[in-house]
Image (cartoon, rainbow, N blue to C red):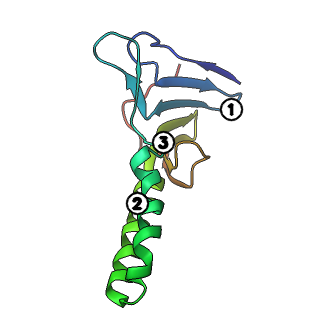
């Protein structure tokens, strides 16, 4: 396995991994700042200080919410929506090229500090591809 970043100055989020039987072209969900500073701008966000305040706020207002089913449902929906937003972020997308077989398109979702939680894969057979020449 050999991994390269062919465009390190302008698009370092692109990487190419060569395996014995296939090649993967991966674009990760981050980029360099456009001001030329070289700072990384993340597309997928991990927990911030506002997210960490949510359990504290809920712990203070929960005694008042317990008596009302509607308020409890609202609190559960807010927490559930926050968790969904953090765990349904696109981490990276990739194209796997299998010579003589076809290509596979993949999207990986999840929390940025963990392995992907969900993966969407779509295989396109070589007979369905047009304008691709063999070397």
Q: Callout 3: helix, strand or loop?
A: strand
Residue at the spot 40% in from the left edge and 60% down from the top edge: 82
Q: Position of residue 116 (x, y in %)?
A: 57, 49
Q: Report the disc number at residue 82.
A: 2
Residue at the spot 43% in from the left edge and 35% down from the top edge: 29
Disc 2/disc 1 C-alpha distance (Å): 40 Å
Vertical arrangement, residue 118 with respect to residue 49, above or below: below
Q: Residues within 10 Å of mark 3 (few under 14, many from 20)?
A: many
Q: Nearer the viewer, mark 2 or mark 3?
A: 2
Q: Nearer the viewer, mark 2 or mark 1?
A: 2
Q: Nearer the viewer, mark 1 or mark 3?
A: 3
Vertical arrangement, residue 76 with respect to residue 101, above or below: below
The answer to whether 131 appears left or right of 3 in the picture is: left
Are discs 1 and 3 less than 8 Å apart at CB? no
Vertical arrangement, residue 49 with respect to residue 7, above or below: below
Q: Position of residue 2 (x, y in %)?
A: 67, 20
Q: Residues within 10 Å of mark 1 (few under 14, many from 20)?
A: few
Please give the residue where the numbered disc 1 appears in the rendered image.
Answer: 21
Dot 1 or dot 3, earlier in sequence: 1
Quadrant for the N terminus, please.
top right
In front: 4, or 135? 4
In front: 43, or 27? 43
Q: Position of residue 93 (x, y in %)?
A: 46, 39
Residue at the spot 32% in from the left edge and 9% down from the top edge: 36
Q: Callout 2: helix, strand or loop?
A: helix
Please give the residue where the numbered disc 3 appears in the rendered image.
Answer: 91
**Residue 84, quarter of picture:** bottom left
Disc 2/disc 3 C-alpha distance (Å): 17 Å
Disc 1/disc 3 C-alpha distance (Å): 25 Å
Q: Callout 1: helix, strand or loop?
A: loop
Dot 2 or dot 3, earlier in sequence: 2
In front: 82, or 24? 82
């Amino acid at each position: 396995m050999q991994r390269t970043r062919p465009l390190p100055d302008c698009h370092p989020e692109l990487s190419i991994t060569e395996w014995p039987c296939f090649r993967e072209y991966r674009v990760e969900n981050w980029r360099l700042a456009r001001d030329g500073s070289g700072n990384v701008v993340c597309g997928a966000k991990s927990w911030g200080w506002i997210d960490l305040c949510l359990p504290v706020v809920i712990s203070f207002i929960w005694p008042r919410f317990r008596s009302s089913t509607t308020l409890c449902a609202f609190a559960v929906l807010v927490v559930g929506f926050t968790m969904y937003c953090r765990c349904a972020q696109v981490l990276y997308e990739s194209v796997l090229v299998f010579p003589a077989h076809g290509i596979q398109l993949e999207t990986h979702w999840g929390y940025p500090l963990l392995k992907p939680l969900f993966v969407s894969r779509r295989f396109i057979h070589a007979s369905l591809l047009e304008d691709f020449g063999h070397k």
